[in-house]
Image (tube, rainbow, N blue to C red):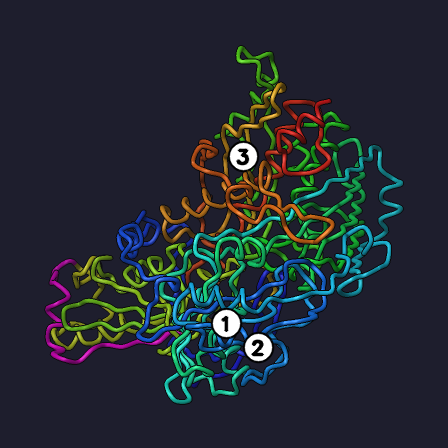
């Protein structure tokens, strides 16, 4: 069969895009059985780059040092809204060691919207940039600019709502007759809750190093999407993509904040072009916390109606989202529309413009916020009905996507409920509310998780096998610390029938031009790993054909397992090197591509978390004692990495529930806790016992691997489960998160 083009869909954070996929019959490999016991995939494996990262040998973008490299800093607006009234650019240019100064209106080689502004509209907006021989000289150049501003009043949420100051039209979705559904309910509850602005806080800040070689650009960028960064740099500087190389070998976290080239790479590239020298631009920690990004603050009101048996008759959501200067509207309404069976739903989302930078993605953007409030309302409804909260959720289980009418490709949420309840000891939860010897109030709460995670094409990979039976996997992955390159090794080793130690995987470089998607939206594993398996499958088939020549036995009668070629009748058992050793300097090469997504299905991930908390009624301190997290994400490639992902998501969810909140000065619009000493991310002392489990059954409708993405799901229900546990312990429901001691004491009062 000759290659053909097939239209498919790719999903990213709930947004669907039609794409054309080049389908080659040689890319197709038979799916492993749903519950197959495999040799490498499904077994715990330590990370390929673990020793390099932990020893300090890994070179992150902030570590890149090139001969003659200049250091750049950015002058940022000290208030949320202002007009630039004066700037001493010439004084800055005359500062010793300063090699270049960029100000608003200066001619540049960059196309598109200006990066620098003379009318900053959000706190920390870039106004000017300086490149100098040393960081100290750059700081002196920034100080010499001596900016003067005409100050303007910052934009707040309530004023924006009153003035209808929206970033785009409010978004309403209606299904059925919500008014009639709520009117027909035997029980009805309404809950209003605020969720906090939540900062990604990656350990490595946004950073870039840029170097020009003639009319070709090389950029080291701390990004989750090196191909997106390449495309943006090429477009901005009018270059063909092949003249732009982006390297992102080691990334110190991103959590959604580092998609594309970013201001850092654009300014570094322009300053490098201007000076003819490499330029490094890395944000300081305070800059990162103020301008790196955030999950937006929301205020949501959820109304639920149900029959006496718990069947939902109507759902209504009104959500106000503090968008900052813009950004796309994250799917805050998706949980209300999708999690539970309900024929009558109305959601309205109001995207209000405020004076922070445009919101950007933070691990399951929108869905975390929506689940956090919806799941608290579900517990309030369970209380009103006198039902067990888990039973209420089971009673409203749904097997299809209610927006499209399509069935889910697979769904094992009921199994997640059962396993989480078993691990948490759910049946004994009411005993926690008995008086405790330590004087603490204890409770247990649950919450449901939904997210997407099917990914989609395009994604490409190659596999090369040498004469020593060692394989090199090359992908377009930028491993942001999740261990995806190790997963690529495992998939290739399984398909090739080789020991894992014989396989190496590489990524983090656009030079091989093997496209990989952005590491976000839980799409890396379901997008890239099928391409890796396809490439390895081609190599395996060629190897078996060559083995047939050498061993004088039909290829169909041979198999490869653990580095040995065996006949199916057991009469032959030789090391694979008996065949590959005859290659000499030749190699066996295979290319693979991600095939189209299945027609007629919606691909989602599901799960349940149960949290147990202890509340000190005297101090207001809430301690999370245990979290059980059970998530249905299809086949698990590496259980060790999967558990690590789940634990990380839970810990971030604990921060969202208890301590993390970006606080803004209403008079200036500037965040006042933009440092890690007063923006409280969880530490090891805050981490409870975390029990993780998975159904670990392949999705039979996904291409060749049956794996879904796991990046986002674990953070989705954590805050809601903790808030429900707090309400179970105290009998009180807080009007806002996080549950800081002051807010808890106010709630208990």
Q: Which comes sooner in the sequence, label 2 or label 3? A: 2
At x 73%, y 25%, the residue is 386
Query: From the viewer's perspective, is residue 415 above or below residue 157?
Result: above
Res 539 → quadrant: bottom left
Q: Nearest the camera: 410 or 673?
A: 673
Residue 21 vs residue 319: left or right?
left
Q: Which comes sooner in the sequence, label 3 or label 1? A: 1
Between the residue at mark 3 and the residue at mark 1, the CA separation in whole angstroms equals: 58 Å
At x 36%, y 51%, the residue is 638
Q: Which residue is mark 1?
A: 130
Between the residue at mark 2 and the residue at mark 1, the CA separation in whole angstroms equals: 47 Å
**Image label count:** 3
Residue 731 vs residue 70: left or right?
right
Q: Mark 3 against mark 1, which lies toward the viewer?
A: 1
Proximity of marks 2 and 1: CB atoms separated by less than 8 Å:
no
At x 63%, y 57%, the residue is 407
Q: Mark 2 against mark 1, which lies toward the viewer?
A: 1
Residue 7 is marked as: 2
Q: Which comes sooner in the sequence, label 2 or label 1? A: 2
Between the residue at mark 2 and the residue at mark 3, the CA separation in whole angstroms equals: 39 Å
Proximity of marks 2 and 3: CB atoms separated by less than 8 Å:
no
Res 585 → quadrant: bottom left
Q: Quick check: is 575 in the magenta stretch?
A: yes
Q: Which residue is mark 3?
A: 418
Query: From the viewer's perspective, is residue 170 above or below residue 444?
Result: below
């Amino acid at each position: 069969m000759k290659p053909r083009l097939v239209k498919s869909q790719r999903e990213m954070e709930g947004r669907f895009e039609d794409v054309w996929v080049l389908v080659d019959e040689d890319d197709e490999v038979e799916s492993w059985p749903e519950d197959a016991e495999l040799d490498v995939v499904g077994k715990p494996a330590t990370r390929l780059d673990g020793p390099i990262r932990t020893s300090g040998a890994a070179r992150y973008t902030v570590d890149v040092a090139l001969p003659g490299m200049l250091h750049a800093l950015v002058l940022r607006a000290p208030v949320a809204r202002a007009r630039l009234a004066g700037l001493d650019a010439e004084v800055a240019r005359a500062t010793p060691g300063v090699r270049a100064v960029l100000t608003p209106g200066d001619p540049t080689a960059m196309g598109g919207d200006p990066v620098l502004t003379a009318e900053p509209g959000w706190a920390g907006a870039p106004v000017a940039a300086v490149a100098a021989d040393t960081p100290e000289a750059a700081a002196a150049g920034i100080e010499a600019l001596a900016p003067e501003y005409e100050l303007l009043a910052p934009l707040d949420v309530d004023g924006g709502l009153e003035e209808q100051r929206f970033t785009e039209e409010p978004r309403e979705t209606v299904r059925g007759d919500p008014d009639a559904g709520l009117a027909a309910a035997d029980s009805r509850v309404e809950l209003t809750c605020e969720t906090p602005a939540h900062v990604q806080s990656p350990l490595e800040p946004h950073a870039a190093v840029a170097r020009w070689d003639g009319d070709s650009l090389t950029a080291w960028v701390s990004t989750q999407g090196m191909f997106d960064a390449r495309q943006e740099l090429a477009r901005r500087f009018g270059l063909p993509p092949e003249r732009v190389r982006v390297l992102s070998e080691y990334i110190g976290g991103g959590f959604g904040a580092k998609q594309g080239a970013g201001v850092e790479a654009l300014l570094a590239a322009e300053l490098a072009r201007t000076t003819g020298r490499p330029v490094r631009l890395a944000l300081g920690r305070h800059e990162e916390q103020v301008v790196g990004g955030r999950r937006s603050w929301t205020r949501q009101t959820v109304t639920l109606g149900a029959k006496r048996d718990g069947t939902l008759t109507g759902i209504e959501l009104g959500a106000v989202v503090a968008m900052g200067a813009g950004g796309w509207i994250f799917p805050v309404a998706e949980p209300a529309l999708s999690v539970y069976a309900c024929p009558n739903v109305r959601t309205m989302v109001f995207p209000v413009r405020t004076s922070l930078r445009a919101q950007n993605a933070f691990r399951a953007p929108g869905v975390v916020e929506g689940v956090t409030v919806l799941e608290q309302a579900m517990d309030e409804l369970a209380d009103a009905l006198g039902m067990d909260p888990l039973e209420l959720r089971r009673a409203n289980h749904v097997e299809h996507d209610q927006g499209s009418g399509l069935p889910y490709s697979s769904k094992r949420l009921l199994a997640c409920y059962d396993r989480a309840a078993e691990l948490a000891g759910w049946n004994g939860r009411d005993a926690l509310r008995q008086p405790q010897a330590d004087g603490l109030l204890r409770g247990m709460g649950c919450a449901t998780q939904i997210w997407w995670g099917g990914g989609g094409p395009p994604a490409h990979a190659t596999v090369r096998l040498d004469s020593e039976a060692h394989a090199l996997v090359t992908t377009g992955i930028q491993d942001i610390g999740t261990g995806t390159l190790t997963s690529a090794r495992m998939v290739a080793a399984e398909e090739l029938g080789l020991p894992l130690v014989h396989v190496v995987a590489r990524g983090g470089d656009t030079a091989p031009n093997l496209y990989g998607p952005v590491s976000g939206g839980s799409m890396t594993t379901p997008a890239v790993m099928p391409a890796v398996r396809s490439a390895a499958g081609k190599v395996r088939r060629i190897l078996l054909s060559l083995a047939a020549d050498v061993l004088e036995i039909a290829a169909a009668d041979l198999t490869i397992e653990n580095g040995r070629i065996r006949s199916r009748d057991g009469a032959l058992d030789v090391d694979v090197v008996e065949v590959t050793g005859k290659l000499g300097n030749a190699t066996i090469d295979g290319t693979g591509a991600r095939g189209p997504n299945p027609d007629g299905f919606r691909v989602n991930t599901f799960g349940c978390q149960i949290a147990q908390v202890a509340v000190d009624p005297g101090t207001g301190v809430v301690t999370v004692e245990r979290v059980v997290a059970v998530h249905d994400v299809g086949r698990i490639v590496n259980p060790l990495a999967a558990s690590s992902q789940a634990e990380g998501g839970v810990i971030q969810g604990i921060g969202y529930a208890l301590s993390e909140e970006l606080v803004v000065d209403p008079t200036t619009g500037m965040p006042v806790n933009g440092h890690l000493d007063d923006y409280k991310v969880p530490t090891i002392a805050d981490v409870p016992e975390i029990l993780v489990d998975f159904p670990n059954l392949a999705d039979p409708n996904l291409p060749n691997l049956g794996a879904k993405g796991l990046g986002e799901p674990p953070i989705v229900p954590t805050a809601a489960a903790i808030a429900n546990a707090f309400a179970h312990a105290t009998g009180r429901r807080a009007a806002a998160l996080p549950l800081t001691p002051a807010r808890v004491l106010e709630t208990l009062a």
